Amino acid sequence: MYRIIDFKRDKLDMPAKVLSIEYDPNRSSFIALLEYVDKTKSYILAAEGLKVGDMVVSSNEPNTEIKAGNCLLLRHIHSGTPIHNLELTKGTKGKGGQIVRGAGTQAMITAKEGDFAQVRLPSGEIRKISLDCHATIGQVSNIDHGSITLGKAGRSRWLGRMPHTRGLAMNPHDHPHGGGEGKSGQGNPHPVSPWGMPTKGFKTRKKRKYSDHLIVKRRP
């Protein structure tokens, strides 16, 4: 198995050929196996439209072609171009691509101001991200992932998802929704988790998170 699901930082400006587009059971999108000109191999998230035999590159140069699968700095990507696999921390100490990695997702640069680009994320949030962060051109592959219907409980079990019991069907000491006579409702003013935390719409983001100043517009 080849390491990494991202472009290698030590392979900047080194073209790579797509050897195969593969299914990964641990993620919703497809992955692409790359072979660099020095014969080393690695995986990246496959962009929609990427085909076997295509050449892709990760580069910091401004004249790099803007096509699906290429990885560029945000400062070299035009506004309105679909992007995915965005970095949030610039430089070699960053964590690589962190957001917009799910099947069929894409983000878009809406404006550039100073050292930051304003990026509209799939959630609708507009966030400031450093122009020195990398992003991959295109939309993440496997667009139809969200429209798949499992059809039966057994297929869900094949995927490793165990059945779960509703809180309403439990006893009072097992779940806050439990108890009652017959087919009674949950009883609580708001639905909660087994440990009493409000759920279904309750926001768990910290009130004073360090990155709040980077959010231009919150998600709807």
Image (cartoon, rainbow, N blue to C red):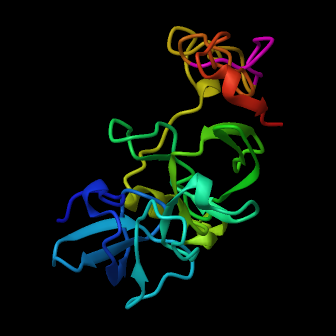
Who is closer to the viewer here, 183 or 207? 207
Does residue 4 appear to the left or right of 89 in the view shown?
A: left
How many marks overall?
0
Residue sitting at 31 percent across and 66 percent down? 43
Q: Position of residue 175 (x, y in %)?
A: 56, 15
Residue sitting at 54 percent across and 65 percent down? 62
Q: Provide the major secondary structure of the magenta segment.
A: loop
User: Which stretch did the figure color magenta?
Assistant: 184-193
Does residue 71 appear to the left or right of 11 in the view shown?
A: right
**Which residue is at the far bottom?**
53
Who is closer to the viewer here, 140 or 93? 93
Residue sitting at 64 percent across and 19 percent down? 204
| Quarter of the image where the C terminus is located | top right
Q: Position of residue 109 (x, y in %)?
A: 72, 53
Who is closer to the viewer here, 158 or 71? 71
Rendered view: 91 above or below 200: below
| Quarter of the image where the N terminus is located | bottom left
* Residue 117, picture quadrant: top right
Say whether residue 179 is visible. yes
Does residue 38 appear to the left or right of 193 in the view shown?
A: left
Rendered view: 48 above or below 124: below
Q: Position of residue 171 (x, y in %)?
A: 55, 15
Q: Is residue 154 magenta?
A: no
Q: Position of residue 26 (x, y in %)?
A: 37, 56
Who is closer to the viewer here, 44 or 119? 119
